């Protein structure tokens, strides 16, 4: 079986060009959207003679899906990476200069996740140019809106659910340091509101202080709910957690607060159903309501639900990716992650998915974000190798 040559110079050029195009998610400060990067991906694919389809997600925001045919029949392999980045404010380097210093390419999105996108684009181009017959078709989906609402991958998943697209497996590009992330956490986020009874704060006993009541709720969550998380330890992701991530309350310095709200960011582990987790909060807090008769508490419906990911390490996709990576990088393992990715949304529509890409998650979203160029080249080589040697029945 042949080999596909990945040129470091081409990888560097493509990544520099991607980083130079701002694609801050519109939800964040300075958010310009992904249009520039989507146009670049279309131009690049067209230049390589690779057909693509455009999948509108929101006005002016589209997923781009490049397609290489292969195999005699059956579904294709999916390479997926998001085009949006977080905001570039508060960076200490020029976010769009894409400077290369000592083998590191600097800029917003270099690590999360334009390194992965560049690796996938160059791998697709190299496969196409090789002229080799591919054992499996391969699609590259460059999607919008991973950093905020996951609408890009949700649109892609809807097309898969409708049977418009069909995949035997997916590699989702995120900075995993070329390790294979086979499990990650999900989350459920919701508000808890407490209502008090306002009054003049010079006579605190005349009202009901919603902030003081919320303090009881917070203490209860810490003492009665959090300790049980240790019993749910998952071997790759660790135990569930919750974080009280926001609090608001009170109306004025001289008024007994009549309301208080906290935000719960509860991270779930594989096997947990987010809605059941939320229901669990509701039920457990009823006990506190019984203890404090005047407590007026509402556990609001979740405003964000995201599922955890869990794919078996013995799945043919994971094993073949491991073999492909081992040719170019040593000591890469199966790992779990605390963060969420597009992979769990693809897994929900029955596409076995693994997270893989160049760069370290600790470099993502930072003030001097960078990625090792050599790691991006290795990722491109491994992805091309994975496709070229892919066997549906595994190794
Ligand atoms: Zn990312």
Image (tube, helix red, strand yellow):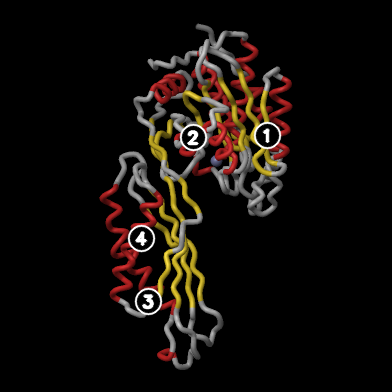
**Which residue is nearer to you in this view: 3 or 264?**
264
Q: Residue furthest left?
A: 231
Q: CA distance from mark 1 to mark 2?
A: 25 Å
Q: Position of residue 334 (x, y in %)?
A: 38, 31
Q: Residue at x 46, y 38 (%)?
A: 344
* Pointer 2 with pointer 4, Cβ within 8 A: no
Q: Is residue 374 visible?
A: no
Q: Which mark is residue 295?
A: 3
* Pointer 1 with pointer 3, Cβ within 8 A: no
Does the Cβ of the disc 4 residue fall within 8 Å of ligand 1?
A: no
Q: Which mark is residue 18?
A: 1
Q: Earlier in the sequence, mark 1 or mark 4?
A: 1
* Pointer 1 with pointer 4, Cβ within 8 A: no
Q: Is residue 185 left or right of residue 98?
A: left
Would you name the residue on which mark 2 appears? 346
Q: CA distance from mark 1 to mark 3?
A: 53 Å
Q: Residue at x 67, y 25 (%)?
A: 52
């Amino acid at each position: 079986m042949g080999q596909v040559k990945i040129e470091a110079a081409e990888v560097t050029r493509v990544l520099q060009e991607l980083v130079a195009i701002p694609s801050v998610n519109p939800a964040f400060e300075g958010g310009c959207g992904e249009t520039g990067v989507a146009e670049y991906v279309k131009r690049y694919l067209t230049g390589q003679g690779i057909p693509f389809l455009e999948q509108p997600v929101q006005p002016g925001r589209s997923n781009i899906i490049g397609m290489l045919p292969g195999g005699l029949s059956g579904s294709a392999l999916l390479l997926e990476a998001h085009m949006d980045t977080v905001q570039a404010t508060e960076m200490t380097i020029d976010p769009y200069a894409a400077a290369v210093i000592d083998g590191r390419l600097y800029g917003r999105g270099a690590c999360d996740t334009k390194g992965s996108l560049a690796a996938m684009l160059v791998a697709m181009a190299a496969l196409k140019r090789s002229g080799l017959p591919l054992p499996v078709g391969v699609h590259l989906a460059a999607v919008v809106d991973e950093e905020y609402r996951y609408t890009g991958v949700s649109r892609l998943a809807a097309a898969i659910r409708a049977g418009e697209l069909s995949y035997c497996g997916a590699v989702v590009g995120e900075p995993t340091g070329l390790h294979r992330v086979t499990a990650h956490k999900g989350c459920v986020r919701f508000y808890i509101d407490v209502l008090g009874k306002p009054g003049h704060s010079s006579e605190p006993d005349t009202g009901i202080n919603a902030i003081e009541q919320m303090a009881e709720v917070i203490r209860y969550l810490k003492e009665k709910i959090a300790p049980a998380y240790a019993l749910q330890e998952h071997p790759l992701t660790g135990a569930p957690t919750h974080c009280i991530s926001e609090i608001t309350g009170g109306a004025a310095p001289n008024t007994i607060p009549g309301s208080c709200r906290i935000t719960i960011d509860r991270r779930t582990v594989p096997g947990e159903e987010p809605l059941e987790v939320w229901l669990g909060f509701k039920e457990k807090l009823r006990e506190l309501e019984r203890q404090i008769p005047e407590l007026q508490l509402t556990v609001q419906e979740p405003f964000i639900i995201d599922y955890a990911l869990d794919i078996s390490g013995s799945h043919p996709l994971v094993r073949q990716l491991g073999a492909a990576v081992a040719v170019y990088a040593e000591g890469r393992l199966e790992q779990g992650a605390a963060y969420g990715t597009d992979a769990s949304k693809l897994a929900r529509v029955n596409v076995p998915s693994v997270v893989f890409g160049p760069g370290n998650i600790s470099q993502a979203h930072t003030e001097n974000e960078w990625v090792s160029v050599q790691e991006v080249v290795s990722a491109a080589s491994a992805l091309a190798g994975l496709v070229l040697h892919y066997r549906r029945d595994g190794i």
